[in-house]
Image: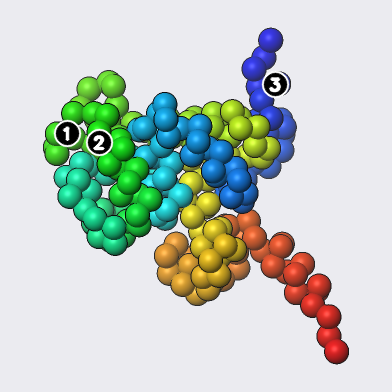
Amino acid sequence: MNSKLNNPNHPVKGSSVKVEPIKSLNAIKAIKRLLKETKPRDYCLFILGINTNLRASDLVRIKLNDVISLKTGSDFEIKEKKTNKIRRVTLNKDCIKAIEIWLAERPVDENVYLFSSQRGNTHITSIYVNKLVKQWATKIQLQGNFGAHTLRKSWGYHQRVSFGVGIAELMVCFNHSSQKQTLDYLCIQPEEIKNVFMNVVG
């Protein structure tokens, strides 16, 4: 039997695929519970993914010596693979704790990657991250189209919706050229436009 037919996370053939953020905080908590006790590496990957705005291609290239001595509120620099620009990334308390949990389970070698691959001295790939995110969504029966970019989008979505961060600030974080691009990227433009019409005048 074709496993794709039984996978609620798989798009319908011929449809336009747009990777979504995880909008439900309950779904985020469910994935945390799924990973924390049994898959500390994946837990760390998920926590860093939804608490920074790094692309998956940059997440996987973080080295241990970038983060091993950091405390809450500390930051590190990484050169973005897509833009070649240097980015400064600040880590919150959840990120630091997730790193500590993962490092407690693995040998500490500062010259290797935080998310190292089992295939030699390299890191896991963004394609593999894409596969992992789809697996997590399927395991908690989360409906929609999810992938590696979901992590970064989830960060932005909740900065806007849960914490009220302004679009102008998020435009800078994502290096977008317009507010419309940011709203559309985070899959919240239709929601915010609809809410405008729900305001009662007078």
- Residue 73, image quadrant: bottom left
- Give the mark nearest the N terminus, 1 or 3: 3
The answer to whether 69 is drawn above or below residue 105 in the figure is: below
**Where does residue 114 sit, x and y in percent of width and height?**
26, 38
| Cβ atoms under marks 1 and 2 closer than 8 Å | yes
- Give the mark nearest the N terminus, 1 or 2: 2
Q: For the N terminus, give its image quadrant.
A: top right
Which residue lies under the disc numbered 2? 103
Q: Residues within 10 Å of mark 2 (few under 14, many from 20)?
A: some
**Where does residue 151 sit, x and y in percent of width and height?**
48, 46
What is the C-alpha distance between the residues marked 2 and 3? Answer: 36 Å
**Where does residue 20 sit, x and y in percent of width and height?**
60, 47
The answer to whether 79 is drawn above or below residue 123 in the figure is: below
Which residue lies under the disc numbered 3? 6
Which residue lies under the disc numbered 1? 108
- Give the mark nearest the N terminus, 2 or 3: 3
Task: Identify the secondary structure beneath mark 3.
Answer: helix
Amino acid carrying label 2: it is: Leu
Which mark lies nearer to you, 2 or 3?
2
Amino acid carrying label 1: it is: Val
Task: Identify the secondary structure beneath mark 1.
Answer: loop
In this picture, residue 18 sits left or right of residue 105: right
Amino acid carrying label 3: it is: Asn
What is the C-alpha distance between the residues marked 1 and 3? Answer: 40 Å
What residue is rendered at 14% in x and 37% in y? 111
Q: For the C terminus, give its image quadrant.
A: bottom right
Disc marking residue 172: none
